[in-house]
Image (spheres, coloured by chain):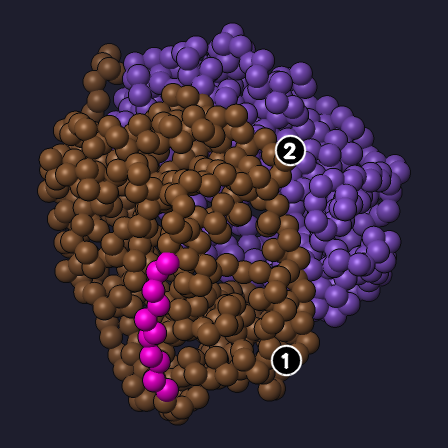
Chain colours: A brown, B purple
Amino acid sequence: MINRKIAPEIKDAVDFDITLKPCEKFTLDNGIPVYVVKSDEQDTLQLEMVFPGGSWFETENLVASAANFLMKNGSSKHSALEINESIDYHGAYLNRNSHHETATYTLHCLTKHLTQLLPVLQEVILDPSFSEEELATFQQNMKQRLAVNLQKCDFVANRHIDKYLFGELHPYGRVSSMEAYDALQTQTLHAFYKQHYTYNNCKIFVAGNLPANMVPLLNQYFGTTKWNGETTIIRPQIPILPAEEKKFRIFNDENGVQGAVRVARHFPNRYHPDFPKMLVLNTIFGGYFGSRLMSNIREEKGYTYGISSQIYNFRQSSAINIHTEAGRDVCEATIKEIYKELHTLQQEEVPEEELHLVRNFMIGSILGDLDGAFQIIQRWKNLILNDLDENYFYNNIHTIKTITAAELQQLAQQYFTPEDFYELVVI
Amino acid sequence: MIHYNKFTLANGLRVIVHEDHTTPMAVLNVMYDVGARDEDPNKTGFAHLFEHLMFGGSINIPDYDEPLQVAGGENNAFTTSDLTNYYITLPAENIETAFWLESDRMLSLAFDEKSLDVQRKVVSEEFKEHYINKPYGDVWHKMRDLAYSTHPYKWMTIGKELSHIEDARLEDVKAFFFKYYRPVNAILVVGGHVTLEQVKTLTEKWFGDIPSGEKFPRKLPVEPKQTAAHKLEVKANVPLDALYKCYHMPGRVEKQYYAVDLISDILGGGASSRLNQVLVKEKKLFSNIDCYHFGTLDAGLLTIEGKLVKGVKMKDAEKAVQIEIDKIQQEIIPERELQKVKNRVESMLAFEDMELLNRANNLAFYELMGDAELMNKEFSNYEAITTEDLHREAQELFDEKNSNTIYYYADK
């Protein structure tokens, strides 16, 4: 008979030797850098083109995201339908995303279809037409979507907490609005596109099972000309203007049965030495299923389906944001418990057993996250776009493995003071 | 081709091993053949509530999550109308921890009153978050009730009403466990950086002595063929009118399923799909419209759902949807369009198979459907579909008498 009360032996995750599989770099004839992580195990590939076309660089609200979205909706040669048709016909996905800093186009496809898809991608990136009709449909549909979202307490809470932290004029705190959608014009979108989606501002990240002639293919479609000309993108300095008031209560729906709770504060960006350490403290506090917040507020009190704490990894300045949707009548009790947990981490050292668990959990997670070429290129992309190298990655792992309970307590004393937090409930 | 080996323990537990030595990780997936469709109509939401209780400690191990996290692992679970699935991902060196944890909770739970108490509250909050406190959140509750007269798909997995969850008692929990959570009713898949021999030894060691249990006879009431269109009008505090149309479709195990799945993709899959192109882009009647289904094992619902552009009349919007439905019923679908949706399926399957966890989960699901090998035959089932098959299935599917429509009006 086995003794089921005794756990099997484990290998401590901190003893795992984690290596970030290297990333190859090529340069196209016109200078575009191409970063590559190959793997031959599947028949799929991912190709991502990254531009400095995020909201940081827009001069009018929503221009960056609208330009990014509408590039795919028609070129001088083909309609949006024809473009979508040729992507769908090959079972491919062409996703676009606009963030604070960057804007991206990502192609996922079966390797065998790549040669048919590259001309389509080229047209989307090099020759978008920004038609009036496509813009009008976009404006109407996005406004409708916004109207629905504005009824959701979590959506409204996210908008407000960012506004308090960074100010509503700052790209991190700026939110969409009906007026901003109405104000969009094709000329502005086209000008923004021309300025930011240029050959000399482009970076390409490729992963998966690549055809042998990948580099010549990319050269053929993106590497021979100085498309859209050479532009210089100047990163404007934008001051953060946080709200002076710290506590907010908003009624969005008088019949709401839950409230969206947010408790947040500023935190230095990823270049600050406290950043990797805070990743560990934040995990203990609210970053995994067994966290302090989850154990207390979900598993002990049953106030919510889920609660977590997150660290924004914005470039200029980041923040810690605790978020949950809780029963309407327990929102205030939830906030009280959040402060109690912050306070405990300031007052008492994290027990060695818990710290050991969190180290292992975090290392196990990283090991799982590095599984597969698509995940690995993602890591490299984050390093490269933030002007970092693999030492940053290894340094983070070193921090997870070696940080002490005393250091964590000191960190909590510095950053977990309740008075420094904004708090918000939206019902 | 997904490679795997299969064996069965003396107690009836079916085991599938999928070796993949390109990853340092391992996955352990347990699927129980029980879902919301097996619930008592007066105790709905139970299968899902039970899933939560599976994390409240087992007979020999007071805390499930903690030792797993110490081993560098993560886990989660989900419940559907048809099944309940639990999965663990962890560094392959520590796979035995997963065996230990998963086998102990199959042996017996701790049946802790406090855990039941808290999870009742947690599930109530989940119910509120997803189905009450969201615009249009109640529509599936209403649609299932409208479309099904008899079959247990009549209620949602989360439960018909909050009170069913609030009334759950510990004795119900025990009875449920010993009826459904037995080796004979479970499928274990172990995948990743493991070997068949290793898994055989570990399975025998940890799961071998769990009493087999009895295979319960599933005698679900059969939904009679719908003979007249159902319609329902709703007014609610939402900003936009919405239209929902559902048609009864074949279950996941039927041959006709594949044609209907392709029809749903022709109508609603991707930006170039018919409904999106005609109704959103050309006629501008909807701000978004989708066509989808849940792939349920028993006969399910093919759904068309869209939000109307402000100012558009419901009857005009519905008429325009009907034109597209008539077209797919009356006209043969062009070969190129059929090829497009087949290519989309091929690609979707390939991307799905990239993740070890998906492969493990799918192997369990296909085994539950009858045979894990079905996973490797899946694409050929789609490839075999002809435009005539689509035409034939569309006739039956989109029969007006087979339809259920909800007109969801903005109360402003």
Query: Which residue is disc 2 drawn over?
Result: A255
Q: Say what amino acid the circle numbered 1 marks.
A: Ser
Q: Earlier in the sequence, mark 2 or mark 1?
A: 1
Return the chain for callout 2: A
Residue at screen point 49% across, 45% down: A157
Q: Is residue B100 left or right of residue B142?
A: left
Answer with the quarter of the image where residue B390 lies.
Answer: bottom right
- SS assignment at label 1: loop
Specify the segment rendered in magenta.
Answer: A231-241
Say if the magenta span includes residue A233.
yes
Asked whether, in this view, residue A254 is left or right of residue A163, the answer is right
Q: Is residue A89 above or below residue B266?
A: below
Q: What percent of the width, then of the height, locates residue B123? A: 52, 26
User: Could you say which quadrant of the image residue A185 lies in?
Assistant: bottom right
| Residue in view at x 46 percent, y 15 percent | B116
The chain that hosts pointer 1 is A
Return the x and y of residue A425 as percentages of the image width and height: 48, 38
**Residue A421, position in %: x, y?**
34, 42
Residue A131 - label: 1
Q: Nearer the viewer, residue A181 or A251?
A: A251
